[in-house]
Image (spheres, rainbow, N blue to C red):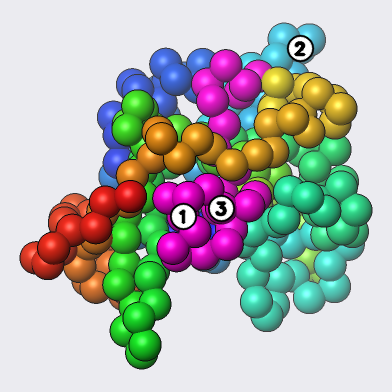
Amino acid sequence: MCGRYTLSVPPQELLTLFSLHELPTLIPRYNIAPTQQIPIVRCINEQGSPQNQLHQVRWGLIPAWSQSGGDGKPLINARSETIGEKPSFREGYQKRRCLVPASGFYEWERSGTQKQPYYVGLTKWRTFAMAGIWEQWRSPTGEIVQSGCILTTEANPVLKPFHHRMPVILSPEDYTTWLAGNVSEISSLLKPFPAAEMQAVAVSTYVNSTRNDDPTCIKPAPIQQKLF
């Protein structure tokens, strides 16, 4: 799964990697948590010309038909195997897909009552994109809330020690297909990322608190590191 992640790269890198129309204004984030605002990239057709644009949405999808407006447990992840069937995610999967830029994400390894956090990243790219979908919900008073969630798939060998699920990570050559392709074209993208191109490093329990959002979160723990 993906319940906490980071995005801490220069805006120029995001501009280039995601073919954005304009330079984004973002601050480095080291502990992004559910219900917070997150940046997503989506393809907007303006005057007949498709453009990739960065938007801020709530992490925790609110279906357009929701009566509660996202009260209760937020829908931060969607299983890729059933996303086309579930009412909460089906229309977003068909019509409102997005890229969720990230530098890495966190998982926790359980040992008895203890939970050791690990920072998971890619060995090849400093920045990558997780597959996502977004929705727009209107409250009874007319307030518009845009929200999104991250797709998950079966865990690869790097993630299996922590969890049976992992986020769907897309290769750059597949970004356009994910944003603008039809359902038959994108189904092959919903698979585990190659384990040989990922690593997990133990970090301090400092990251456990969502109040902490600084580079200390990703600093290797002062214990023997475990690298998968």
Contact (Cβ within 8 Å) of mark 1 with mark 3: yes
x, y percentage for residue 177?
70, 21
First-in-chain label (2 vs 1): 2
Q: Which residue is mark 3?
A: 155
Examine the rendered structure and indicate whether residue 139 appears above or below residue 193.
below
Q: How many marks?
A: 3
Q: Element at badge 1? A: loop
* Labels 2, 1: front one: 1
Residue found 78% across the figure and 75% down from its top: 68
- State the image coordinates of residue 163 (x, y, percent, origin top left): 51, 64
Q: Which secondary structure lies at badge 3? A: loop
* Type of the residue with mark 3: Ala
Classify 10 Å Cα crowding around label 2: few (below 14), some (14-19), many (20 and above). few
Q: Is residue 153 magenta?
A: yes
Image position of 141 (left or right of 124)? right
Residue 100 on image: x %, y %: 54, 40
Q: Nearer the viewer, residue 30 or 144?
A: 30
Q: Is residue 68 visible?
A: yes
- Magenta stretch in the rendered image: 152-176
Q: Is residue 183 left or right of residue 197?
A: right
Q: Residue at x 49, y 59 (%)?
A: 160
Q: What mark, if any, has residue 47 been given in the picture?
A: 2
Q: Which label belongs to residue 159?
A: 1
Residue 223 figure quarter: bottom left
Tell me the kind of residue under disc 2.
Answer: Gln
The residues bearing labels 2 and 3 have C-alpha atoms spaced at a distance of 41 Å
State the CA–CA distance, disc 2 to disc 1.
43 Å
The residue lying furthest to the bottom in this view is 113
Specify whether residue 162 is painted magenta.
yes
Using the image, determine if residue 39 lies above or below residue 89.
Answer: above
